[in-house]
Image (cartoon, helix red, strand yellow):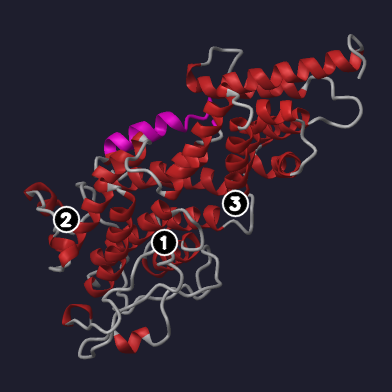
């Protein structure tokens, strides 16, 4: 590409559009008319295509703008090509320092957590070697985002997540709605929509929750992504009833248990346990709530841990987990109600009666994917009243370091 030639000018123009795309993405709803992400993306798509072999920045621009204009299913091939390019060794040092963060964003956009982790780790190591302080700062911040999802920090950083954890769902709803506005179309919308769905359900806004679920489902581009399908199943469970809800919860625990995303797994256990308690299946609720409590405690998510503990107390549990910290009277009053925890919204109940034995995720759900079961076949015998079984055990749902409850070799009448 000759300096000053048409191809060179086109290449510089496309780099300028990519910088503009980044600026608009960061500005979000604060961007002025003409600078909104959708507008910038459409303008970038109208720019001349590069001559010769596309550069890494060209691949990123094509994939990210297509994602905003035509949505993710149409953009996945281009995004995947860009991610694979940065995973290889043909990217120049300059391109890796300048655009590596966008490659991570692209991996996140298609729910490719494994490659996001690889890219974030590699970018930190690469920027640290020459002492490039600005790229290193950017790379460390991105690596911190990965750490948050894995539960490797002591405090939550998302306002919507924190408010949901505290049971302040109206505030969580407001924060999530602001972060998922259609006008800005942020790539991180996919991470906030599950918060919006939970907050909407807890505040009695089922219509808003279903709309958000439709948006989240439209972002599910990767068939093999347990991260994506696990969040989708957990979110769908919140707007479902009866057997479908239970199968979705089971799928969420199973899928998220195969990922390193411990906070998401813990929340699946928590929501499943809350649902089981509202169905008056307290023994089975305790298993899920203990798993949630121990995971939240391990990662330092205090608000969610307290929520799990208050739910344990509401089941009649008096274990060391449930007694570990004094619970406030307001939390106790909240937990012993039959409605959604922390709200006055009524609990949706199916008109039919369900068995006291949790239904495994066995493929009978029309919406939640069939493949793996949450409970072993023998659990229905070992956990019925009058037996001395050890309770239920999630097949892979305890992958985050949670011990089965009760511990091996110990029985308790409370867990029969």
The answer to whether 123 is drawn above or below residue 376 in the figure is: above
For label 1, the residue is 400
Look at 29% across and 60% down and name the residue there.
Answer: 294
Does the magenta portion include 59? Answer: no
Q: Earlier in the sequence, mark 2 or mark 3?
A: 3
| 10 Å crowding of disc 3: few (<14), some (14-19), many (20+) | some
Q: Are marks 2 and 3 in contact (CB under 8 Å)?
A: no
The x and y percentages for residue 367 are 52, 62
The answer to whether 265 is drawn above or below residue 121 in the figure is: below
- Looking at the figure, which quarter contains the C terminus? bottom left
User: Where is residue 315, by image quadrant?
Assistant: bottom left
Q: CA distance from mark 3 to mark 1?
A: 16 Å
Q: Secondary structure at mark 1?
A: loop
Look at 33% across and 58% down and name the residue there.
Answer: 295
Q: Secondary structure at mark 3?
A: helix
Q: Earlier in the sequence, mark 3 or mark 1?
A: 3
For label 3, the residue is 114
Q: CA distance from mark 2 to mark 3?
A: 37 Å
Q: Which residues are magenta?
A: 170-186
Look at 34% across and 48% down and name the residue there.
Answer: 201
Q: Is residue 105 visible?
A: no
Look at 28% across and 82% down and name the residue there.
Answer: 390
Residue 335, numbered circle:
2
């Amino acid at each position: 590409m000759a300096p000053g030639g048409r191809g060179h000018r086109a290449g510089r123009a496309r780099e300028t559009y990519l910088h503009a795309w980044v600026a608009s993405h960061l500005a979000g709803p604060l961007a002025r008319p003409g600078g909104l992400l959708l507008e910038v993306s459409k303008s970038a798509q109208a720019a001349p295509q590069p001559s010769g072999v596309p550069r890494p920045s060209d691949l990123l621009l094509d994939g990210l703008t297509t994602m905003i204009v035509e949505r993710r299913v149409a953009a996945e091939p281009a995004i995947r090509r860009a991610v694979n390019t940065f995973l290889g060794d043909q990217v120049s040092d300059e391109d890796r320092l300048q655009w590596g963060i966008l490659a991570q964003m692209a991996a996140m956009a298609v729910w490719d957590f494994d490659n996001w982790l690889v890219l974030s780790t590699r970018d930190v190591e690469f920027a640290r070697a020459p002492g490039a302080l600005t790229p290193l700062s950017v790379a460390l911040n991105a690596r911190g985002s990965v750490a948050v999802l894995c539960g490797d920090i002591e405090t939550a950083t998302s306002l919507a997540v924190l408010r949901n954890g505290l049971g302040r769902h109206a505030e969580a709803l407001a924060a999530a709605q602001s972060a998922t506005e259609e006008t800005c179309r942020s790539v991180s919308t996919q991470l906030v929509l599950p918060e919006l769905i939970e907050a909407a359900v807890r505040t009695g806004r089922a219509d808003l929750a279903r709309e958000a679920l439709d948006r989240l489902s439209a972002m599910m581009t990767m068939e093999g992504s347990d991260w994506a399908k696990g969040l989708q199943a957990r979110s769908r469970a919140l707007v479902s009833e009866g057997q479908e809800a239970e199968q979705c919860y089971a799928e969420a625990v199973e899928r998220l248990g195969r990922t390193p995303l411990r906070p998401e797994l813990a929340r699946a256990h928590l929501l499943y346990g809350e649902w089981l308690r509202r169905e008056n299946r307290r023994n089975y609720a305790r298993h899920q709530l203990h798993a949630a409590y121990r995971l939240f405690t391990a990662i330092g998510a205090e608000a969610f841990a307290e929520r799990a503990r208050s739910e344990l107390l509401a089941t009649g549990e008096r274990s060391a987990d449930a007694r570990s910290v004094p619970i406030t009277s307001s939390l106790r009053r909240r937990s012993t109600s039959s409605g959604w925890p922390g709200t006055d919204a009524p609990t949706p109940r199916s008109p039919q009666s369900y068995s006291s034995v949790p239904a495994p995720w066995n493929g009978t759900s029309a919406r939640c994917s069939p493949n793996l079961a949450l409970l072993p076949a023998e659990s229905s015998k070992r956990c019925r009243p009058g037996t001395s079984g050890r309770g239920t055990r999630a097949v892979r749902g305890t992958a985050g370091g949670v011990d089965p409850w009760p511990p091996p070799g110990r029985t308790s009448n409370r867990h029969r």
